[in-house]
């Protein structure tokens, strides 16, 4: 009887230790975990309200960073819809997330155009832009590829561009790469996990 009690105590203690370890276990994600990446350290651009922005401005929030352009016919609006839907799923925690849309078409994407475009998805989304050199610099920093494709009219063009999304944790560390078309559930689940484990 004494041994049974002793054995039960050992099992119970082990269970408590495992439970405690579970609270500090490495988070798991549905998107690609790129923690420790040697790129995507920072940026300096202007938002659509005219304010100069760097990554440090959003410390304490998870940052969702997407590169696109407002005349994009498919990938860009589809991604914005997915992210907006994900934030709805996060409910109150959505206030701890900042979505940034970096234009690769600063020639046409004026601050007014960015503001109008993003307001269709969420008034909290921010558009970022720079001059052509700044755009090239941030694209290089985040390994983004983009190229102008001329249409029949000289006044019209499209932009071929990388279509994934980066996510930073609230401490400002680049953590995730979300592939195009991953869906709102991937964004919602992984952002929630970052918020939980970075508290």
Image: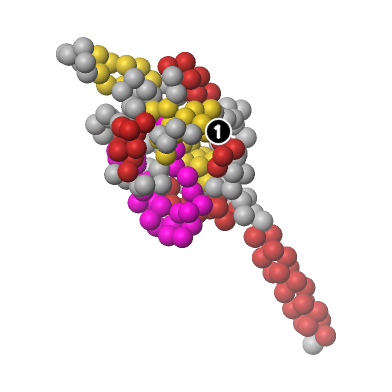
Looking at the image, residue 108 sits to the left or right of residue 55; the answer is left
Q: Position of residue 144 (x, y in %)?
A: 45, 24
Looking at the image, residue 99 sits to the left or right of residue 14; the answer is left
Whether residue 131 is visible, yes or no, is yes
Residue 122 versus residue 175: which sits nearer the camera? 122
Looking at the image, residue 164 sits to the left or right of residue 52; the answer is left
Q: Position of residue 111 (x, y in %)?
A: 36, 31
Q: How dense is the environment of label 1, judged by Cα within 10 Å: few (below 14), some, or many (20 and up)? A: some
- The structure residue drawn at horizontal position 64% and vertical position 60%, both measured from the top left corner, is 22
Residue 182 versus residue 9: which sits nearer the camera? 182
Residue reaching furthest to the left: 152
Q: Is residue 51 magenta?
A: no
Q: Position of residue 197 (x, y in %)?
A: 60, 53
Looking at the image, residue 41 sits to the left or right of residue 165; the answer is right
- The structure residue drawn at horizontal position 42% and vertical position 39%, both measured from the top left corner, is 126
Residue 45 versus residue 139: which sits nearer the camera? 45
Q: Main secondary structure of the magenta part?
A: helix
Circle 1 is placed at which residue position? Answer: 54
Whether residue 184 is visible, yes or no, is no
Total marks shown come to: 1
- The structure residue drawn at horizontal position 26% and vertical position 34%, both measured from the top left corner, is 74
Q: Position of residue 89 (x, y in %)?
A: 39, 57
Q: Is residue 81 magenta?
A: yes
Residues in magenta, as a range: 77-102
């Amino acid at each position: 009887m004494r041994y049974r009690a002793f054995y039960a105590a050992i099992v119970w203690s082990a269970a408590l230790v495992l439970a405690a370890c579970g609270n500090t276990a490495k988070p798991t994600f549905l998107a690609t975990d790129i923690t420790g990446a040697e790129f995507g350290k920072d940026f300096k651009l202007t938002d659509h309200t005219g304010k100069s922005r760097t990554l440090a401005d959003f410390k304490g929030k998870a940052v969702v960073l997407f590169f696109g352009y407002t005349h994009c016919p498919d990938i860009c609006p589809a991604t914005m819809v997915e992210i907006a839907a994900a934030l709805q799923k996060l409910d109150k925690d959505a206030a701890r997330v900042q979505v940034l849309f970096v234009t690769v078409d600063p020639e046409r994407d004026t601050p007014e155009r960015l503001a109008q475009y993003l307001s269709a998805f969420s008034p909290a989304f921010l558009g970022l832009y720079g001059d052509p050199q700044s755009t090239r610099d941030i694209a290089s920093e985040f390994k983004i590829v983009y190229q102008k494709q001329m249409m029949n009219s000289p006044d019209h063009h499209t932009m071929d561009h990388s279509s994934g999304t980066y996510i930073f944790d609230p401490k400002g560390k680049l953590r995730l790469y979300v592939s195009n078309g991953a869906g709102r559930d991937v964004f919602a689940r992984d952002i929630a996990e970052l918020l939980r484990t970075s508290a």
